[in-house]
Image (tube, helix red, strand yellow):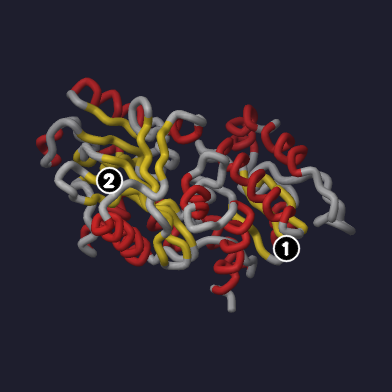
Amino acid sequence: MKIVVLAGGTSTERTVSITSGTGICKALRQKGHQAILVDIFCGIENVDRENPFPSEYDVDAASEYMSAFNDRIEQMKKERRSFFGPNVLKLCEAADIVFLGLHGANGEDGKVQATFDLMGIKYTGTGYLSSALAMDKGITKQMFLMNNVPTPRGVSMVKEEMTTDLKALGMEFPVVVKTCCGGSSVGVYIVNDQAEYEQALKDAYSYENEVVVEEYIKGREFSVAVVDGKAYPIIEIAPLQGFYDYKNKYKAGANKETCPANLPKEISEKMQRWAEKACETAGVTTYARVDELLNEDGDIYCLEINTLPGMTGTSLLPQEAAAVGMSYDELTKKIIEISLEKYN
């Protein structure tokens, strides 16, 4: 098949997206597909009109080309009106399917998916509405609560209605402050006192206009991939220092990751059922990853749904797939197969 692997973009997860896209593109070409790597925002200036999906293709060169724009993205955003870069939409229209290697805002939040739906472009992953709902942590929390999916207590606050009085929110320290629509734990802060709380609010609002403040749950961290409605083996993430933040997520050796997680069968099955229920609640189909916590009392908490999970060398989804005997290359193939099913 002719496949555009779409990556890059303008979010805080741009560099992670490029790494994911590079791995995906290599895997697809390994499977014999005519896959090309394209930056959704920066695009490609010179496209071979006669043969845009060549048999011979240098994935690493394409990745380096995308990375060369990293320091110019903010300036380009000021100069540009259109989000889509040169030739991006034309290439996507010419492809049999677009593999979304995007992460974060303007990629994982439903905007690109909605555009593609209107243009008749096939793409991997869940649809535009479920993408938008799952991207917003405040809305996700409300949906969880309405559907009795266990989740930490919390509220969302826009900057104009911000309060520094935790008691007014019905909470006490410690709490977690996080951006409403961020990803990869960018803009997530665990705070223990008033000074830390006020600084966390200031930092979080520097990313976007809405934040979530929720009770801090001390416990073990887990991730559960849900592919085609079924949960994969659970992976436990134990950071060697701090919590599972952006730095720890993408630094090799920063975490001890165990898959399948060392859990009693009953707890493991509960976590898997809640992951499936969380996706069902938000209407998330195809594939996703649900982050969960387990406290000392055995209580499970669902935190959020990642609708376009990372596909880097240290990412969790490929590790969970490996636990059921599925290689990285086979995982990309599986994602395409189940994504195409929604168009049949």
> Residue drawn 35% across and 63% down?
276
Which amino acid, by three-letter code, is at mark 1? Ala
Q: Position of residue 151 (x, y in %)?
A: 23, 51
| Quadrant of the drawing holding the N terminus | bottom right
| Quadrant of the drawing holding the C terminus | bottom right
Residue lying farthest top?
A: 195
- The reply, left or right, for residue 323 in relation to residue 9 is left
Q: Position of residue 161 (x, y in %)?
A: 24, 39
Up the image or down, 12 lies above or below 7; here it is above
Q: Secondary structure at mark 1?
A: loop
Up the image or down, 213 lies above or below 319; here it is above
Residue for badge 2 = 293
- 264 or 181, which is in the foreground? 264
Badge 2: residue crowd in 10 Å (few <14, some 14–19, many ≥20)? many
**Upstream in the sequence, badge 2 or badge 1?**
1
> Residue drawn 40% across and 45% down?
181
